[in-house]
Amino acid sequence: MDSVSTGRRRRGSFLAGFLLIALGALLLLTTTGAVSFGIWLEIVDYWPVLLLLTGMEIILARRALLIRAGVIAATLVAVVAAAYLSMPEYDPPEPLRTEYVEPLGDARRLHLSMAFIGGDVELTSDTTASGSFARLLAADFGSHPSRVIREQSNGDVEFHLASSGPFLRHSSYDGYTRRVSLPVGLADWNLEVSPDVEIDIAISAGAADLALDLRGLNVRNLDVEAGASDIRVQLPANMGQTYVDIAAGATDVELLVPDNVAAHIDIASPLGSAWIDPARFMEIEDDVYRSANYSDSRNRVWVDIEALSANVTVR
């Protein structure tokens, strides 16, 4: 019995030793800059190989030491090589900025996305400049300098704001190559956006305190994904159709709907509560509310809120 237990311990230590060597080598390569840290994101996809290696260790337990070592070492090398070859291309980090201003120019539509771990964001309409001084976007990043990436296709301008972290380039399923960032910092942002263009806003955050005054803006889509959040949105007026999609773990949401705007509100929150102005929005089914004139209204908003725990107020 003692010899069997000793053999098992040796086999376990043998496999663990190779894993420690492989992990240590990768850490050395990434800390020295020889390999991008993005390889760790790819290595995670190969976790089933650990089960294969354990099976090989059991099957080859009675084989010669060199055979076992060769098979396991070759497998680990193959995994690292596959992860390296499939690793997305990382771009050099954009400089950190404390503020950013983009002239309006010939822009017709703005796609504005944001990513950060936690912090505060205030967004309003830019009414301070006009004519040749009109601005598409004015950003004050406060005490947390952030990165800005800008892309443009004809009149469509896309901005991605990230509290920090490098950008990576990846190919999506639709065949287009896009750049995204790895947010690892906090946000303290004040943003002003032009009222003269159509706007799509996407916010991804761990924890967020969002104050979004969209009253003077032509917002077509607002998407928010957050862990824990406090969200206050003043919705657009006289802007046709707007879509709002909020997904969060735990959130307090306050939506202010202009008097001339009709709304459809769908709330899915098993641990949540809601107060929806009964004088304006009637409950047509469980947790679904709608203005009586929604179908005929020229200005309307469709709201979807999904959260584990959401306290929702709509006025």
Image (cartoon, rainbow, N blue to C red):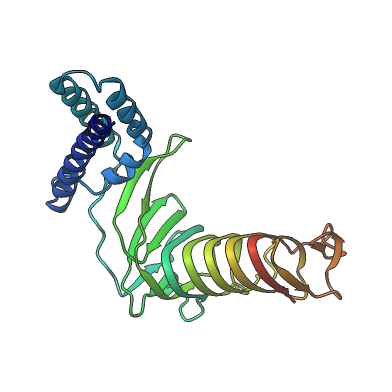
**Location of residue 186 by image quarter:** bottom left
* Residue 198 coordinates in the image, percent (x, y): 56, 60
Q: Identify the residue at image location x=64%, y=66%.
A: 309
Q: Position of residue 145 (x, y in %)?
A: 31, 73
In the rendered structure, the answer to whether residue 26 lies left or right of residue 196 reads left
Residue 72 lies in quadrant: top left
Q: Position of residue 220 (x, y in %)?
A: 61, 59
Query: Which residue is at the front of the view, 307 or 258?
Result: 307
Residue 10 versus residue 149 in the image, above or below:
above
Say whether residue 315 is left or right of residue 253. right
* Residue drawn where x is 50% and y is 71% of the image: 208
- Most foreground residue, 72 or 120: 72
Q: Is residue 285 above or below residue 230?
A: above
Q: Is residue 244 left or right of residue 22?
A: right
- Residue occupying image coordinates x 85% and y 64%: 283
Image quadrant in which you'd find residue 265? bottom right
Name the residue rendered at 33%, 34% in the picture.
50
Above or below 203: residue 215: below
Q: Quadrant of the N terminus?
A: top left
Q: Quadrant of the C terminus?
A: bottom right
Q: How many marks?
A: 0
In percent of width and height, residue 24 lies at 17, 46
